[in-house]
Image (cartoon, helix red, strand yellow):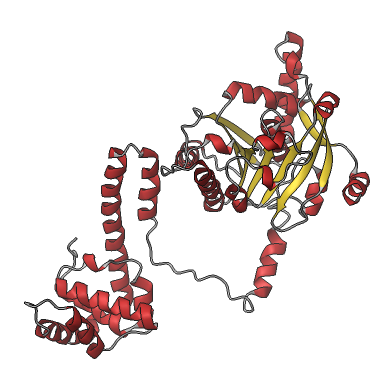
Amino acid sequence: MPYEFSENIQRGILYLCKSNKDFYLQIVNLIKESYFEYPSHQNIFNTIKNYFDSYLKLPNDDFVLEEIRDKLGETESITEYEDELEFINKVDITAINNQEYYMDLIEKFARRSAIKEAIKESLTLIQEDNIDAVPEVIKKALLINRDINVGQSYFDVARNRWDRILGTEEAEKFGTVLPMCNDQLEGGNSRKELCMVIAPPGVGKSLWLVNQSVQALTEQRKVLYLSLEMSEDKISQRFDSVMTGLPNRKLKEVSTQLRLHQKLEAAKEKYPNSRLIIKEFPTGQATVATVRALLHQLENYEGFVPDILIVDYLELLRPCRKIEAEWQAQQRIAEELRGLAVEYNMLVWTATQTNRQGKMVKIITDAELGDSYGKIRTADWAISLNQTEEEYSQGKMRGYIVKARDSRQRYIIPMSVNYKNLRITQELDYDETEKAISA
């Protein structure tokens, strides 16, 4: 791919690359040797890069020539490179003093070149019937820039770091439906985290996610609920019961309809900043790239940027790239979901299935995860829902904290499930629950 700048500009870039470490470090990840027009320029750049990768310093001209000499073909001469290095070293210094100008040129061309390559790759993906992977390829090309963020210096930023943490911690917490968990989490979960609810089929994963969404709405949050199994209307009906406390089976009755609308209007007034969007995707068709596209559309056309994303549920998503093994696919999806949480600065909640053993054990742990143990590695917080037939008939359930990255884990919380209005609550008050945990 020919470089679209003059020969002297290319020489100026090479001169700065071999003589200025700061310049080299800022542009090395932006350009490839193929971006240079002449093979001699390509080889010189590649030699500089290989030397720095090996020794963490820039080479002198003698080393560049020695390395190139070892790789010359029988019909090639080192004289060409000696002459070229002489031309590079004679570049007008006043023309290259403005390093920012050179870096801006490189950044502009690198982005344009990356987009061209992304388009070619996208055509291949389309031919392979892997259309869902295209947005991610294009997105990476558009993100190319020379901004450098090498992290934070631990000792130098301690005061600023704690000012930032203490100043935002309370506002950034997302409470769970269980007060005891909120206490252990110092208020709840945070943005950029992935949380999971684990249970066998029919125990209440979707019910938990609806209750968790309502909890967020009472905190004046914006919630995006993605259903990959149930229709938007069915999910909305569950929200109607949990939000209002009205019996789910009576919502169709005329008398209940009047009360429903009154209660929803009251909730809208009480939580004016809350918003809920429910979106249904065909089962097994959506990928995280599909979700990303939806987030982009919601922001551009609705002005809606969610604080919390609910994905109901993980196994019904497809990975962006084709993966044969199911366990690898599920782990990859979990990683992609957490990446989405970081990218959009939101909390992501999802549900996942247990294996057959999950129906037989008293307490579901990570050992009972269906198909893939790796998916929980990515999660920041995970709770399993445990219920016997007897507990079901009594409206009881036990939550077990399977994983908590930054707080207490491996404890049980007794819960109640009101199957009339679909609400999940902590069964005991704080003191009694603490005693139950400690028992």
As drawn, is 117 to the left or to the right of 79? right
Quarter-wise, where is residue 206 in the image?
top right
Let me know if residue 98 appears in the view.
Answer: no
Q: Nearer the viewer, residue 198 or 121?
A: 198
Q: Quick one: quadrant of the N terminus? A: bottom left
As drawn, is 104 to the left or to the right of 295? left
Q: Nearer the viewer, residue 80 or 327?
A: 327
Q: Position of residue 237 (x, y in %)?
A: 67, 22
Q: Is residue 180 above or below residue 153?
A: above
Q: Position of residue 310 (x, y in %)?
A: 61, 38
Q: Position of residue 422 (x, y in %)?
A: 76, 26
Q: Position of residue 330 (x, y in %)?
A: 53, 43
The residue sitting at 81% across, 51% down in the picture is 183
As drawn, is 198 to the left or to the right of 10? right
- Can you name the residue that lies furthest to the left here? 75
The residue sitting at 12% across, 84% down in the picture is 78
As drawn, is 294 to the left or to the right of 433? left
The residue sitting at 49% across, 39% down in the picture is 291
Q: Nearer the viewer, residue 322 or 1?
A: 322
Q: Nearer the viewer, residue 306 or 359?
A: 359
